[in-house]
Image: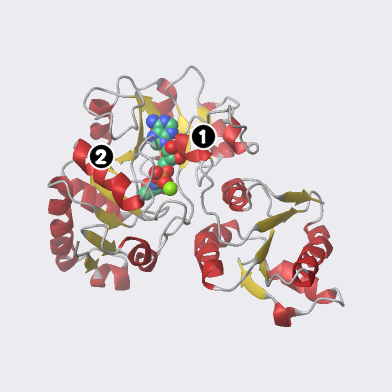
Amino acid sequence: MDTKIIRLEDYLRTEILSDADRDKLKIAAKILRDGGLVAFPTETVYGLGGNALLPEASERIYAAKGRPSDNPLIVHIADITELEPLTAEIPEAARRMAERYWPGPLTMVFKKSPLVPARTTGGLDTVAVRFPVHPVAMELIRMAGVPVAAPSANRSGRPSTTTAAHCIEDLTGRVDAIVDGGSADIGVESTILDVSGDVPQLLRPGAVTREMIEETLQISVPEDAALKGPLGADVRPKAPGMKYRHYAPKAPMQLVMARRDPADAAPEILRFLREAADRGQKPALLCSVECLEELKRLDSFCEKDIIIRLTGSRSDQTVMAHDLFECLREMDETDAAYIVAEGCSEQQLGYAVMNRLKKAAAWQILYV
Ligand code: TXA
Ligand code: MG
């Protein structure tokens, strides 16, 4: 299959869609409507879109990603009026969340209506719906005139894609088109809140944080077991996708978390790096600028033989989230044989970052 690269030249320069950009998006919208696949930017990560109402389009999404077909897709809309036909009921809590956070990086799981094919929801009787705020995503879905099913636009098992270049790397020859709308702002996938049961439950943390949800709904929000630790073979996470070892870099990864003073992590990180080198495994380090400074103050730290990727400052979780998947992808391009990563605070957006890091590390975490 030939993959058409659609570069939105004006949007890339100005962050405003021009008429020329819109004409290009019309081509992508027609591909979607006709059952084809288009990768496109959203504010969280890139999505691999197909017409959510056509079972064959969902089938093609699973094939393009190499994803097990029991893993349901998120259905994207571009107007709140598109929600009702997809769902059997819209609980009050969902209305309040939608009012406050849609369009935006929030997905909600509803009881589905018969309109949504079982192929799109992996056979579940619920449907995950998201109303993204990215101008390109909004315009594309609106032009397509149909709800758009879109998982993250990566090959299964690889980190989610946050730039068109990542999509080109993973999906060339597997989708009809890739829309280049620059780098995704947030960098981690949307928050998933299940509102299909009696009490709203957090299935995946994202930029709409648990603190924000609890403040809006004035309740304490329980979270799925998948967020708390490695799942036993007999436990089924509510979001089927959370059971897979996502985002795993090729090299094994050790996460080091400081419980009190962030500086406490440095000596342990150094120890892991040294032990890897002693075993003959090329060590790599993923940490904040502050952590690197702390390591440099430890007199036995030697930068020379370590692959280093920095995730910005500890004080700026937005940079950490934005760069996370790119850093993990870059690690795979090096000859790193053992990765040591610094954990961050689990408040607010940090909780979403840590959730991805814990999975990347297959829950190898040292708390100090
Ligand atoms: O930010 C995002 O959400 C991105 C962009 C493209 O919108 N999409 C995304 O999709 O991350 P994906 O497929 O990579 O992750 C969707 C997650 C999976 O873990 C899946 O199991 C869960 O959502 N999910 C989808 N439908 C569900 C449902 N009906 N019930 C429970 N979990 C569901
Ligand atoms: Mg994904």
Tell me how far mark 1 sits from mark 2, CA to CA: 24 Å
Disc 2 marks which residue? 79
The residue carrying mark 1 has its beta carbon less than 8 Å from ligand 1: yes
Q: Look at discs 1 and 2 and give the one toward the viewer.
A: 1
Which picture quadrant has residue 96?
Answer: top left
Vertical arrangement, residue 143 with respect to residue 117, above or below: below
Q: Are marks 1 and 2 in contact (CB under 8 Å)?
A: no
Rendered position, 359 above or below 109: below
Please, what is the three-letter code of the amino acid marked with disc 2?
Asp
> Does dot 1 land on a helix, a strand or a loop?
strand
Q: Position of residue 121 (x, y in %)?
A: 33, 32
Residue 216 visible in image: no
Q: Nearer the viewer, residue 354 or 153?
A: 153
Tell me if residue 22 comes above or below residue 82 in the rendering. Answer: below
Q: Residue furthest bottom?
A: 304
The image shows a total of numbered marks equal to 2
- Residue bearing the label numbered 1: 203
Q: Is residue 283 left or right of residue 64?
A: right
- 38 sits left or right of 337 in the view: left
Residue plotted at (24% across, 71% down): 10
Extreme-front residue of the structure: 280
Q: Residues within 10 Å of mark 2 (few under 14, many from 20)?
A: some
